Image: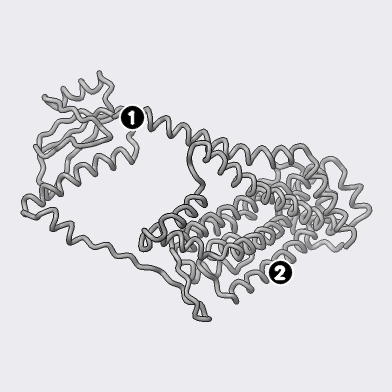
Amino acid sequence: MNKIWLIIQREFLNRVQKKSFLIATILLPLIFPAIMGVLVYVAKEQKKNATKETILYIDESGYFQSDSTKYIFKPFHGSLEDAKRAFNLDESFGLLYIPKFELTDPNGIKLYTKINPSPTDVADIERIFENHIKDLKMQQLKIDQKLLDQLKTSVTINSVKISEGGQEKSSDSKVLFGVGMGAGILMYMFIFIYGAQIMQGIIEEKMSKVVEVIVSSVRPFQLMMGKIIGLASVGLLQFLIWIILISTLSTVVLGMFGMQSPTQEMMQMNGQYAAATQGSNSLEILNAFTQIPWSYVIFNFLFYFIGGYLLYGALFAAVGSAVDSPAEAQQFMFPITIPMLISYFALFTFILQDPHGPISVWLSIIPFTSPIAMMGRIGFGVPLWQLLLSMALLVGGFILTTWFAGRIYRVGILMHGTKVNYKVLAKWFMQRG
């Protein structure tokens, strides 16, 4: 155990004391607020200096009304072919052709542009037609707009979770969806990035022959275990520093532009407008946000981050010990990343849509998919037995993958110039030490 601890210390200090670590740890949190500041500034300037786009139109229906705050509609009197020629010679954004149509079947409308229009542009023009045609239909049916407005009824369902002890907590599916999605994506990114760092570090030591000296005094399994845990502690430290610096600097940058962070906005809204907006959606979302047990979510995130990182780190270490260059490692990387890809795509297709469904439950229990899947479910509330079973299997999975990878590592770390394939890996695994 002492040897493993010494290797953990060596790996941790060796990485933390490098200039590359200090640069990445400090520079990256500076980049994100800087990018945010630039984007906010550009968006404000663009909005300030925005000019209305001009659209020529031919209206054969007689129904079109050019009431828009975003576009300037100019009628063209002439044939469509003449309009196309005129459109090619000026700087108008588009040419809108409106043929004769029935209000019950408004088809045949075309928008000609010199570049592919964005979905927002098309949707805005469609909305102009939809609103105007609706007004025309109401006039035909002699329906008063005030009467129609009175018929509209807004229904809001407040979701309240009742615990086994009878306690009631308000919740909001949109907030829980956002928490699950953000946690799942972060889990996928960090496990993949830091797992690849383990593989790269082992390949570098293998090629520099340093590992041959180290292996003479410790077992290869102890060396691999120490490297995995040491690099995991480096990754966790860097992650915590990033969270603190990015959140702090982002608040400063937003403050420079007269904006507030989401947390500040919610606190201000809660303090100033709670009484006035007691039944509003904004306050309901705020209440649901504050009802989330953040300490519980953060604890589980750290547990699954460390557990998933150690589990996949062992497999990445085995790959790094078996090859002599990152290019050779590509053929072994894909099978390792398949479970991560499955859980990542399932996060959006199954887990966030139905967090308590059978597929979501099984994916959150299987060790290779549980780090991402469980974080997608954690905000919605997970039964204690499922959480404990998932944690136990993740720990067991890490031990199993470490044992499996150790059998490959003990042979592969000393091999150079060997053409490695899956048959060779199986032979190393079966070889007795």
Task: Name the foreground residue: 151 vs 271.
Answer: 271
Which element carries disc 2, helix, strand or loop?
helix
Q: Residue flagged by tag 2: what amino acid is it?
A: Gly
Which element carries disc 1, helix, strand or loop?
loop
**Any part of residue 290 in sight:** yes
Does 137 sit above or below residue 65?
below
Q: CA distance from mark 2 to mark 1?
A: 56 Å
Q: Pointer 1: what residue?
A: 115
Q: At 47% across and 52% down in the image, what residue appears?
A: 268
Image quadrant where residue 205 sits: top right
Residue 262: image location, x then y, percent: 50, 50
User: Disc 2, disc 1: CB below 8 Å?
Assistant: no
Residue 309: image location, x then y, percent: 68, 57
- Decide: few, some or many residues near mark 1? Use Cα within 10 Å; few <14, some 14-19, many ≥20: few
**Any part of residue 369 in sight:** no
Does 105 sit above or below residue 281?
above
**Quadrant of the drawing holding the C terminus:** bottom right
- Decide: few, some or many residues near mark 2? Use Cα within 10 Å; few <14, some 14-19, many ≥20: some
Task: Name the foreground residue: 367 vs 177.
Answer: 177
**Quadrant of the drawing holding the N terminus:** bottom right
Q: At 51% across and 33% down in the image, what residue appears?
A: 38
- Side of 212 relative to 246 (left or right): right
Q: Pointer 2: what residue?
A: 396
Q: Residue flagged by tag 1: what amino acid is it?
A: Ile
Image quadrant where residue 364 sits: bottom right
Mark earlier in primary sequence (2, 1): 1
**Total marks drawn?**
2
Specify how the rendered protein is coloured.
one colour
Q: At 46% across and 56% down in the image, what residue appears?
A: 271
Does 102 sit above or below residue 82?
below
Q: At 60% across and 77% down in the image, what residue appears?
A: 385
